[in-house]
Amino acid sequence: MSCVYGPVPSRRLGQSLGIDPIPSKTCNYNCVYCQLGRTRWLASDRKDFYPPESILAEVEAALASHEPGRIDCITFVGQGEPLLCRSLGRLIRGVKVLSELPVAVITNGSLLWQPGVREELEAADVVMPSLDCADETTFRRINRPSPILRIAEIISGLAAFRQQYRGRLWVEAMLVRGVNDGELALLGLRDALAFVQPDQVHVNVPIRPPAEGWVEPPDEEGLMRALAILGEAATVVAPYEGTFDLSTDLPLGEAIVEVIRRHPMKESELLRTLGDCPPRVVETALADLEADGRARRVEFRGQFFWRYVGGANGGEPR
């Protein structure tokens, strides 16, 4: 499996070439809203899951295969938590040798209490950690973290990173109806964000099928309450329209899997991306993926999505 994919459209970064240094659903969180499903390996220790040299070689090849202007950013993100990659700092520095494009890291921020991890991330141009709440009870309910993690320590780590980091720090808060969109939870989050002092706060809501079927985005009142409490620095992240790159030597079905295992796609997005393929060929490829259990067509809030299953999400949403 390749560790480099895309470019894919990002709502905040434009056309992003993704680097995925972590195996499928290996994370120290098991978030109820995760678009990739439930965590299969609730990991705590950092290690190299793939040879760093191989990842950098893939990045170099991917950059060479795309015309200038086709990629806006290179982003460490994927099927698990990037900070669990022990060589992440080395990879960031290596990518910056290969390209002048900005490098971003999308992370849950859970290991920033470790000075060595903070130092590794200093080389990135943009760091985008999540912070969904500020109290331990809500943290356990929404993020379902590794038992060794504590939200107070994570918030302190984010604040320490802010003090030393000279790049852009964008914190994302994912809101789930009835979990962290109430006044008390939002007031606590507001105070934590004031302590961290990020450059931007991105308020997000589930827009793709979540790990747990009961997850719903806040209603309009809940979203307005969040914006009012979190203040002027908070903005709602709007859906981004862009193009997915499925140009590859892989068979069509395998090319689809390489994207949806990291980024579930709306059926309309997928069909538009594959517009040059005969409809019957696309239908056959999707039917084959569904038949062998690697992909599934699911409905979420009136829209259909194709998501990777393949047994890697630790079970189907309930």
Image (cartoon, rainbow, N blue to C red):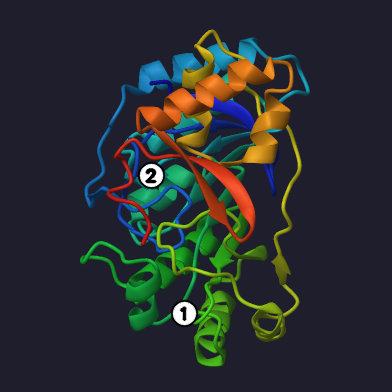
Identify the residue under disc 2.
Answer: 80
Of 69 and 42, the residue lying toward us: 42
Residue 42 appears at what percent x and percent y?
A: 24, 52
Identify the residue under disc 1.
Answer: 179
Quarter holding residue 219: bottom right
Q: Is residue 289 above or below residue 261?
A: above
Q: Is residue 47 left or right of residue 187?
A: left
Q: Residue at x 67, y 26 (%)?
A: 100
Residue reaching furthest to the top: 249
Closer to the chain start, of discs 2 and 1, is 2
The answer for how far apart the CA atoms under marks 2 and 1 are is 23 Å
How dense is the environment of label 2, judged by Cα within 10 Å: few (below 14), some, or many (20 and up)?
many
Query: Circles 2 and 1: CB distance less than 8 Å?
Result: no
Q: Is residue 159 left or right of residue 8?
A: left
Q: Residue at x 66, y 86 (%)?
A: 229
| Secondary structure found at label 1 | loop
Q: Residue at x 34, y 44 (%)?
A: 25
Quarter holding residue 6: top right
Quarter of the image containing the N terminus? top left
How dense is the environment of label 1, judged by Cα within 10 Å: few (below 14), some, or many (20 and up)?
some
For badge 1, the amino acid type reads: Val
**Nearer the camera: disc 2 or disc 1:** 1
